[in-house]
Image: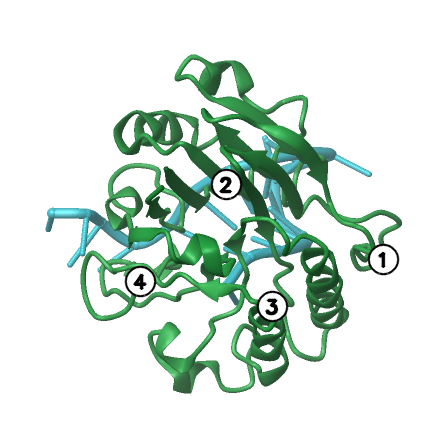
DNA sequence: ATGCCGAAACTTTTTCGA
């Protein structure tokens, strides 16, 4: 089974690139983040023509996650119990969903950014991770993979220049502790192989030629239960998808699982 | 060459991203 995750930064703006990538990479299951469209507006017909069932969770302009599968898409759940609401919001944002695909419980996650450490958005980010931990703890009895944009660089090696991130979000001990809490559930970080350079970065800012200088971050992660992690045959960052006209600022991660 | 920010909307600037 080929599993993939990709923050597409608008599924509408990225639709030609998405369809092209699906036809080429042929994942069995794809987790999408930052779809930036409502569930009703999700291009289900277009991906359906390539053989994918789709489920989407989104409310419009911001956030949004989706799951595509050609090996079954059952028991879809949107959000999770105890998910906190956004800052100054009355309802949770569209940042999490799950489905059972080919015998695997698959989550597509888009963690809050946090903005700055003194922002209420940072406290919200940590609360969101704490609630996510409890939600995933209830699902560890089955083969589980939690994929997505975690908006946390697990180690200093996961940012191009740690000195530039001192005092910034994405690298704080509390954020890294939140990831460690997920690993303590038994989830393992499936670290992909970079196509170029020593670091498997998955995100490069659009600005200032960051991609071309390989100044990136590894913030998109695949967290797999031990049984699933043991089935991993290969995993890589498809940085080709970050090139060319109209790319997302994130590259997909592709994971091949054995039986 | 990978090639120097992009998406969305209560749009003609502002908000957000990390």
Q: Please tell me whether residue A241 is drawn above or below residue A227 in the rendered image.
A: above
User: Neighbour class for label 1 at 10 Å: few (<14), some, many (≥20)?
Assistant: few
Sequence-first tag of 1 and 2 = 2
Q: Chain of mark 2?
A: A
Chain B tint as drawn? cyan
Q: Please give the residue where the numbered disc 4 appears in the rendered image.
A: A210
Q: Please give the residue where the numbered disc 3 appears in the rendered image.
A: A182
Residue located 18% across and 60% down the image: A196
Q: Chain of mark 4?
A: A
Question: Left or right: B4 with respect to A225?
Answer: left
Between tags 4 and 2, which lies in front? 2
Between tags 3 and 1, which lies in front? 3
Outermost right residue: A90
- Same-chain check, marks 3 and 4: yes
Marks 4 and 2 sit apart, C-alpha to C-alpha, by: 25 Å
Residue located 56% across and 67% down the image: A186
Between tags 1 and 2, which lies in front? 2
Helix or strand or loop: what does disc 3 sit on?
helix
Residue A88: assigned label: 1
Chain A tint as drawn? green
Q: Please tell me whether residue A241 is drawn above or below residue A183 in the rendered image.
A: above
Helix or strand or loop: what does disc 1 sit on?
loop
Q: Please tell me whether residue A169 is drawn above or below residue A21 in the rendered image.
A: below
Sequence-first tag of 2 and 3 = 2
Between tags 2 and 3, which lies in front? 3
Marks 3 and 1 sit apart, C-alpha to C-alpha, by: 27 Å
Between tags 3 and 4, which lies in front? 3
Question: What x and y, as percent, mark residue A13?
Answer: 46, 31
Q: Please tell me whether residue A124 is drawn above or below residue A118 in the rendered image.
A: above
Q: Please give the residue where the numbered disc 2 appears in the rendered image.
A: A31
């Amino acid at each position: 089974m080929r599993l993939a995750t990709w923050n597409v930064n608008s599924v509408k703006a990225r639709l030609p690139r998405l369809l092209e990538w699906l036809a080429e990479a042929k994942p069995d299951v794809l987790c999408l983040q930052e779809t930036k469209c409502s569930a009703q507006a999700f291009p289900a017909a277009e991906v359906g023509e390539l053989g994918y069932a789709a489920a989407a969770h989104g409310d419009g302009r911001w956030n949004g996650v989706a799951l595509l599968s050609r090996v079954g898409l059952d028991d879809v759940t949107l959000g999770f119990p105890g998910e906190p609401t956004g800052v100054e919001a009355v309802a949770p944002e569209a940042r999490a969903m799950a489905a059972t695909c080919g015998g695997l419980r698959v989550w597509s996650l888009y963690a809050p950014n946090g903005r700055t450490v003194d922002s209420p958005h940072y406290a919200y980010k940590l609360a969101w991770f704490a609630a996510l931990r409890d939600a995933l703890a209830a699902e560890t009895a089955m083969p589980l993979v939690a994929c997505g944009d975690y908006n946390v660089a697990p180690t200093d090696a996961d940012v191009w220049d740690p000195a530039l991130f001192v005092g910034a979000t994405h690298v704080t001990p509390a954020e890294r502790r939140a990831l460690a809490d997920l690993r303590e559930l038994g989830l393992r970080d499936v670290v992909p192989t970079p196509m170029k350079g020593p670091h498997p970065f998955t995100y490069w800012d659009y600005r200032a030629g960051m991609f071309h200088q390989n100044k990136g971050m590894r913030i998109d992660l695949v967290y797999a239960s031990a049984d699933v992690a043991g089935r991993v045959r290969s995993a890589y960052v498809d940085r080709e998808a970050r090139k060319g006209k109209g790319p997302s600022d994130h590259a997909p991660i592709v994971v091949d699982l054995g039986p």
